[in-house]
Image (cartoon, rainbow, N blue to C red):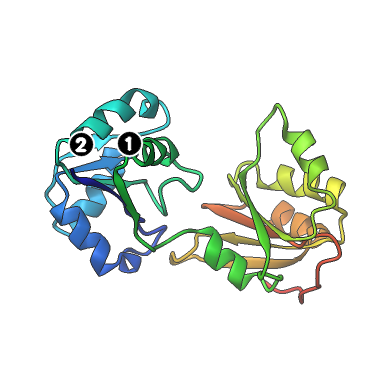
Amino acid sequence: MGRLYVVPTPVGNLEDMTFRAIRILKEADLILAEDTRTSGILLKHFEIKKPMQSHHKFNEHQMVESVVNRIKGGETIALISDAGTPGISDPGFLVVRECVRNGIEVQCLPGATAFVPALVASGLPNEKFCFEGFLPQRKGRMTRLKALQDESRTMVFYESPYRLLKTLIQFAEYFGAERNASVAREISKIHEESVRGTLARLIEHFTATEPRGEIVIVVAGKDGKKVEDAE
């Protein structure tokens, strides 16, 4: 029987790719990629010449059985997403679950995940935190925010730059405008930036400055420690 490797890929800087990740991808019989065009650039950069197959949220349910059968037949399959660790706000959970259910060995390599550097660099308590990923865009969004009002741990969210300001305003409404937070964008890229301060301060900043790039929002829990306001 083969095995499934879950392989993190850089969230920005290609130098964040590990030697082990490159080796595994070169040895795999098949690479499952969220977007073969995006992953094709990465594979070409590291001279990895292996067959790829699309594996994304629109087809993963249909693909799971065939992937499991191929691994049972002896193939080694590597799963990657466009950036970061598969399964963290990206496709991956379903195929991992089915492999585990079928007694297939699953190995997840350590590597890039956007929320970890954002959390550590935020200056907010990180010994305990909760990862919320992307909030529901419509149904269930307000219910989730209300449920988090009394959360004492630091909270971590992913957000689109197009919805960032709206989300910060909603956070101020539910958590209080004086709640401390940090917005990290373009992590590990040339224009990486962290803006820290109260939610009121962040709303003011991103009202004046249009946000761009991938966004991670870190929000202090209820009664969380205060960090210094800085850009």
19 in relation to 11, above or below: below
Q: Residue at x 35, y 67 (%)?
A: 16
The reply to whether discs 2 and 1 touch (Cβ–Cβ < 8 Å) is: yes
**57 or 101, which is in the foreground?**
101
Residue for point 32% across, 49% down: 106
Q: Nearer the viewer, residue 159 or 165?
A: 159
Badge 2: residue crowd in 10 Å (few <14, some 14–19, many ≥20): some
Tell whether 67 sits left or right of 114: left
Residue 56 x, y percent position in the rendering: 37, 33
Query: SS class of the residue under badge 1?
Result: loop
Type of the residue with mark 1: Asn
Where's the N terminus, which quadrant?
A: top left
Q: Is residue 223 left or right of residue 45?
A: right
Mark 2 secondary-structure assignment: helix
Residue 198 appears left or right of 34? right
Residue 16's place in the image compared with 59, above or below, is below
- Which of pointers 2 and 1 lies earlier in the amino acid sequence? 2
Report which quarter residue 79 is drawn in.
top left
Q: Disc number at residue 72?
A: 2
Q: Position of residue 52 (x, y in %)?
A: 20, 39
Residue visible at 31% across and 69% down in the picture: 15
Mark 1 highlights which residue? Answer: 102
Say what amino acid the circle numbered 2 marks: Lys
Q: Percent position (x, y) of residue 168? A: 74, 49
Left or right of 156? Residue 169 is right
